[in-house]
Image: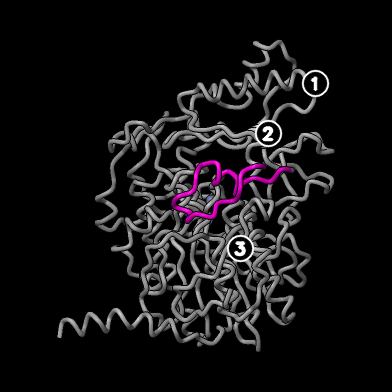
């Protein structure tokens, strides 16, 4: 008996896989910003709501953002394009164009810097930098009746998941849900959501009630002049910045998404529609409090509940929908708490590694004027001052390479020439060298002259400030490994351990819709082990 039961269990998923399901009428593509596989694994046993339900679909525990620059914009750019940043152009949240016409040489990934008045900090939102089409664009190209809508806590999440000319695109701009499109009339859902969120932010945010598994994680850890670890995510009235690091921020995005599905009658037409939803609060909680405290526990507990409510609402409408959920990147805990838990090498990057500081030192040593080095962080892309004369540039280059290579916090430094010669990785994403990971983030026109990768658990926030204590952005697995879930009502639980990539999501969803894609134009491949989806022959 036991043996036949086992056999039946082993055969069932295969039988389920062999049956392609008809295309759903609505694809709900959800990105939970900074939801690492480490977090998902840690909390999976506690989920009772939407995340528990979705985990009953096909769950790839080892999904990878396969590129090195594990930031929000690149991460979101891979999810619905099937393309690495090296192909889609979104190499970082911010890169530098030292020849840009404007005085601000930093270029924000989701801006159009050609618009007068746009700057990297106060920018004109645009998809102009995304070089490849998104799934929504391909669906529209096949049938213009297919509609694409985005709702997100961050403009870069909404823009990178929907690309050019979606039907609606709404993102939080710090005060309200806004759009870069000329959307007229503004849907009633959006006006209503903006009124509701204004009232919510204006009132104080009460501390959340902690379930026992969260109080078990409460422990105060000193960091800089403050402490984290036992917070309840309460906030002062009117504090819109703190609001982003509370579950209510995701709750508002989900509520707006649900209202737009109703108002626009998504999933009720003859062809499939797509809604992309970017849930950003987990990322703000991670940056503000780290990943291992009571705060993150409360965030994930609330997100699980709110996602459950959202899915129940879709059920109640009788919609034929499919959900894909993943993340743009993972995250690391703050070094102060990592050290307490035995990760002895965890540390903050030294201020001397900031491009401005190192450039100043090299300039003094080599008697060069100007900044010598330009870059946003100790980790990632670094550019040489474009005004250096060729002979000075050569001296600066060898001195900078020597300085980075000698630094105890630096794992590797690659030159743009080196990365241009490196082939894209063909090995599974859990392997792959650091050079290959950096190659998947490399665009010759946008990337730095040097790409600096810090050692494991070196947090590139030298001094905790502006409320940020922890981050991501490294080529290490805690920042790259994310869950990838495909779920439809009636799904058979199918937990997968093989390493797959977020660039595989788009070809897989395309197969679900029998939408042909040109394999030469994407980096990902249709995942063969998703229940209900049959990949086209290659
Ligand atoms: Zn992010």
Task: Provide residue 114's location: percent of width, then percent of height.
Answer: 83, 47
- Seen in the picture, residue 353 relative to 221 is either above or below; the reply is above
The residue depicted at 77 percent of the width and 71 percent of the height is 184
Q: Which residue is mark 2?
A: 449
Q: Which residue is mark 1?
A: 389
Contact? badges 1 and 3 (CB < 8 Å): no
The residue depicted at 36 percent of the width and 55 percent of the height is 298
Task: Provide residue 312's location: percent of width, then percent of height.
Answer: 44, 78
Contact? badges 3 and 2 (CB < 8 Å): no
Which comes before the other along the chain, label 1 or label 3? 3
Q: Mark 3 to mark 2: distance in Å?
A: 26 Å
Res. 227 image quadrant: top left
Residue 105, magenta (yes or no): no
Quarter of the figure with the N terminus: bottom left
**Is residue 498 shown left or right of residue 251?**
left
Which comes before the other along the chain, label 2 or label 1? 1
Q: Regarding mark 2 in the picture, which secondary structure is present there?
A: loop
Which comes before the other along the chain, label 3 or label 2? 3
**Is residue 96 shown left or right of residue 486?**
right
Magenta stretch: dominant secondary structure: loop
Q: Regarding mark 3 in the picture, which secondary structure is present there?
A: loop
Residue 439, magenta (yes or no): yes
């Amino acid at each position: 008996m036991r043996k036949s039961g086992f056999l039946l269990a082993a055969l069932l998923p295969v039988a389920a896989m062999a049956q392609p399901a008809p295309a759903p009428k609505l694809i709900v593509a959800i990105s939970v910003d900074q939801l690492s596989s480490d977090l998902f694994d840690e909390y999976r046993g506690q989920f009772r709501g939407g995340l528990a339900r979705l985990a009953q679909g096909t769950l790839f525990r080892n999904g990878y953002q396969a590129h090195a620059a594990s930031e929000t914009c690149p991460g979101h750019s891979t999810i619905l394009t099937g393309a690495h940043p090296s192909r889609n152009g979104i190499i970082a949240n911010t890169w530098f164009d030292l020849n840009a016409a404007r005085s601000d040489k930093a270029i924000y990934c989701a801006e159009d810097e050609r618009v007068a008045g746009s700057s990297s900090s106060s920018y004109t939102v645009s998809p102009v930098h995304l070089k490849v089409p998104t799934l929504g664009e391909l669906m529209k190209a096949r049938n213009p009746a297919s509609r694409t809508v985005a709702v997100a806590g961050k403009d870069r999440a909404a823009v990178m998941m929907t690309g050019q000319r979606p039907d609606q695109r709404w993102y939080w701009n710090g005060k309200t849900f806004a759009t870069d499109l000329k959307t007229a009339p503004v849907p009633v859902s959006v006006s209503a959501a903006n009124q509701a969120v204004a009232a919510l932010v204006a009132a104080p945010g009460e501390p959340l009630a902690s379930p026992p598994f969260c109080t078990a994680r409460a422990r105060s850890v000193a960091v800089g002049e403050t402490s984290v670890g036992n917070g309840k995510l309460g906030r002062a009235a009117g504090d819109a910045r703190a609001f982003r690091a509370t579950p209510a921020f995701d709750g508002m995005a989900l509520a707006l998404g649900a209202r737009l599905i109703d108002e626009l009658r998504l999933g009720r037409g003859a062809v499939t529609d797509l809604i992309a939803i970017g849930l950003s609060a987990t990322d703000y909680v991670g940056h503000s409090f780290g990943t291992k405290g009571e705060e993150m526990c409360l965030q994930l507990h609330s997100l699980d509940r709110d996602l459950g409510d959202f899915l129940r609402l879709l059920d109640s409408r009788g919609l034929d929908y499919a959900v894909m959920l993943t993340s743009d990147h993972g995250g690391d805990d703050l070094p102060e708490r990592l050290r307490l838990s035995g990760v002895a090498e965890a540390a903050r990057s030294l201020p001397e590694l900031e491009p401005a500081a190192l450039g100043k030192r090299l300039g003094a040593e080599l008697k060069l004027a100007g900044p010598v080095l330009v870059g946003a962080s100790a980790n990632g892309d670094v550019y040489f001052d474009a005004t250096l004369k060729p002979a000075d540039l050569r001296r600066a280059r060898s001195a900078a390479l020597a300085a980075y290579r000698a630094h105890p916090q630096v794992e590797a430094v690659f030159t743009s020439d080196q990365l241009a010669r490196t082939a894209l990785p063909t090995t599974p994403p859990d392997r792959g060298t650091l050079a290959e990971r950096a190659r998947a983030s490399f665009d010759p026109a946008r990337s730095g002259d040097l790409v600096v990768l810090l050692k494991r658990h070196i947090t590139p926030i030298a001094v905790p400030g502006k409320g940020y204590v922890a981050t991501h952005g490294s080529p290490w697995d805690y920042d790259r490994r994310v869950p990838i879930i495909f779920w439809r009502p009636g799904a058979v639980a199918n937990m997968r351990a093989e390493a797959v990539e977020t660039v595989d999501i788009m070809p897989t969803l395309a197969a679900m819709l029998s939408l042909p894609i040109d394999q030469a134009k994407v980096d990902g491949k249709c995942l063969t082990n998703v229940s209900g989806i049959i990949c086209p022959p290659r």
